[in-house]
Image (cartoon, grey):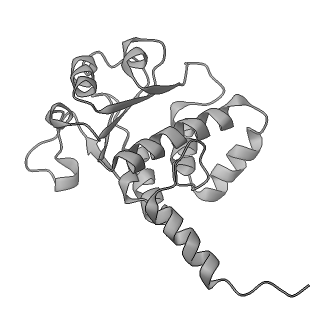
Amino acid sequence: MDAVRVALLREVLAGTEWLGATRRFAGVLRGSVVSHGGGLLLVGTPAYEPWHLAAHLVDEAAWSGTPELAPTLVRHDARPGDPAHLAVGPGRIEAARRGETLLVVAPEEPAELLERVHEARRAGVTVLALGAGGGELAAMAHDALAVPEGAELDLDSVQHLVSAAAGENNSPRVRRGFRDRLSRLADILTAPPAAPW
């Protein structure tokens, strides 16, 4: 989904809770990776790997000048012979430490991940959950955005809204980092002078 389609989707959803909810969650995501300076780990389930969200977050990281948004995709069936960006297995969750953020995207409760996610949280990792709602994952997550089955939007559409909002500098609850403030100052200082009264 490109920027035009995201804009159209936002227009259609105007007045619903989805826009505020996805922007809020994106703000939490962006704020956690920017303020902690650690990496972003993105994991799904063996049946649902969030490839598309990973690609969009990489794009948003580049466009927004926020490299911290570019995730490491953790795959359940990663093999040593895979290209480097596809060879990260679930053991990476166990190695995660304070300052890192773990985003779990799952259409249903990811029973096979719960113990690893719990251990990562105990190690100081910020845990965010997208998709499955109301279960153990949502209870242990620092923040969660549930996409219940039968909702107006499916999980893929919500991921598009979240990734687009994460790349925006005006996402709610986002503290401006040094680079954002420096960029804003440079814009102000290099802007043409104001027109005289």
Q: Residue at x 54, y 44 (%)?
A: 160
Q: Which residue lies furthest to the left in this view?
A: 80
In the picture as drawn, the residue positioned furthest to the top comes out as 135
Using the image, determine if residue 8 lies above or below residue 187. above
Relative to 181, residue 146 above or below = above
Q: Is residue 33 visible?
A: yes
Which residue is more in the foreground, 133 or 153? 133
Residue 121: x and y in percent read 28, 25
132 horizontally vs 116: left or right: right
Numbered label tally? 0
Report the residue that reaches farthest toward the front. 197
Q: Quadrant of residue 115?
A: top left
Q: Residue at x 43, y 18 (%)?
A: 138
Residue 96: image quadrant is top left
Above or below, comparing residue 170 to residue 179 in the picture? above
**Residue sitting nearer the eye, 115 or 8:** 115
Give residue 174's position: percent from left, percent from top.
53, 46
Residue occupying image coordinates x 50% and y 69%: 182
Q: Tell me, yes or no, if residue 159 can be seen here.
A: no
Quadrant (top left/top right/bottom left/bottom right) for the C terminus: bottom right
Where residue 86 appears, x then y in whole percent? 21, 49
